[in-house]
Amino acid sequence: MEYSEWAPVYRRIGAELDLPFAREEAAFARLRELLPPAARDHPLERVARRLQGREVVVVGLAPDAGPPPLWRWPAGAGRLAVVAADGATTTCLTAGLVPEVVVTDLDGPVPAELAANQRGSLVVVHAHGDNGAAVAEWVPQFPGELVGSWAGPPRDGIIDVGGFTDGDRAAFLAEHVGARRILLWGFDFERVVEDDPRAEARKRTKLTWAGRLLAQLAASGRVPLVTWERDGTLTPYPAGIHGASTR
């Protein structure tokens, strides 16, 4: 998705969740300062080299999902490109899968993401108004290839091609760089595990938006978006679900 399409959607999200854009700007500045120069050099082209023209499975962290069943993938269908959304990196590594790309806002098991990065994963680090301390702590420790993202207009080699949570942001990234098809594994928009009722309500709102955004991506028709079911079947992701339009 181009930023011109995404910006009005994010303004709605920011208004609903009270996300002051000044804090996003501060996060952008911190990330730009900490990223090595190579991380800001042709970021989308480097992601495209890993995902363009390929079947991409975006791995989420739904309860009990486990790793994607790559053993079910037809031998002649070409090797899947695995993209892990934040905490799903641990799921992948435990199963012996090194993701091509990890998409993270650094609120999951960052040591696993460091390990994946060391083993060859490109890590897309997203800075936002609530994770400045994590950006400062972890970005300098990544040993491998990085790309930076944020919620504002792309600039200084830091990208924004749409998406709000790590999972849907990964799908938007795969679409933008020309994936042939996107398979969603381990996505659940209903179950929330939070002890604090306020945190639970906020998490539910975020998941609702994630579902809406994926429905918008499916409706765009730019790339097929499917859910990989536990029995191995592929189900088209239904456009227009999960409540109100993003427009």
Image (tube, rainbow, N blue to C red):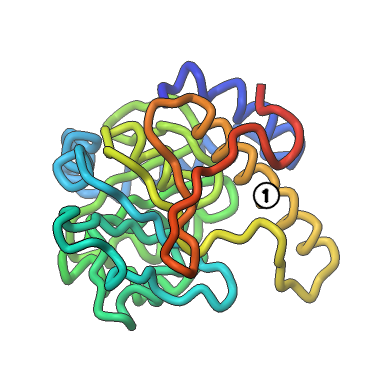
The front one of 144 and 12 is 12
Quadrant of the rendered structure where residue 144 is?
A: bottom left
Q: Is residue 15 visible?
A: yes
The front one of 74 and 103 is 74
- Give the residue type that dot 1 points to: Lys
* SS under mark 1: helix
Question: In the visual, does 98 lie left or right of 92?
Answer: left
For mark 1, what is the residue?
Answer: 206
Q: Position of residue 76 (x, y in %)?
A: 14, 57
Q: Position of residue 178 (x, y in %)?
A: 26, 33
Q: Residue furthest top?
A: 4
Quadrant of the rendered structure where residue 202 is?
A: bottom right
The residue at 18%/70% (across/down) is 118
Total marks shown come to 1
The residue at 28%/55% (across/down) is 101
In the rendered image, the vertical position of residue 82 relative to residue 89, given as above or below? above
The residue at 50%/39% (across/down) is 163
Question: In the visual, does 10 lie left or right of 173?
Answer: right
In the rendered image, the vertical position of residue 193 relative to residue 181, given as above or below? below
In the rendered image, the vertical position of residue 183 relative to residue 98, given as above or below? above
Question: In the visual, does 17 lie left or right of 61?
Answer: right
Q: Is residue 114 visible?
A: no
Crowd class of label 1 (few under 14; some 14 to 19; many from 20; radius 10 Å): some
Q: Position of residue 61 (x, y in %)?
A: 51, 68
Q: Residue furthest bottom?
A: 94
Q: Quadrant of the N terminus?
A: top left
Q: Quadrant of the C terminus?
A: top right
The residue at 16%/71% (across/down) is 119
Q: Position of residue 173 (x, y in %)?
A: 36, 39
In the rendered image, the vertical position of residue 86 relative to residue 22, given as above or below? below
The front one of 77 and 205 is 77
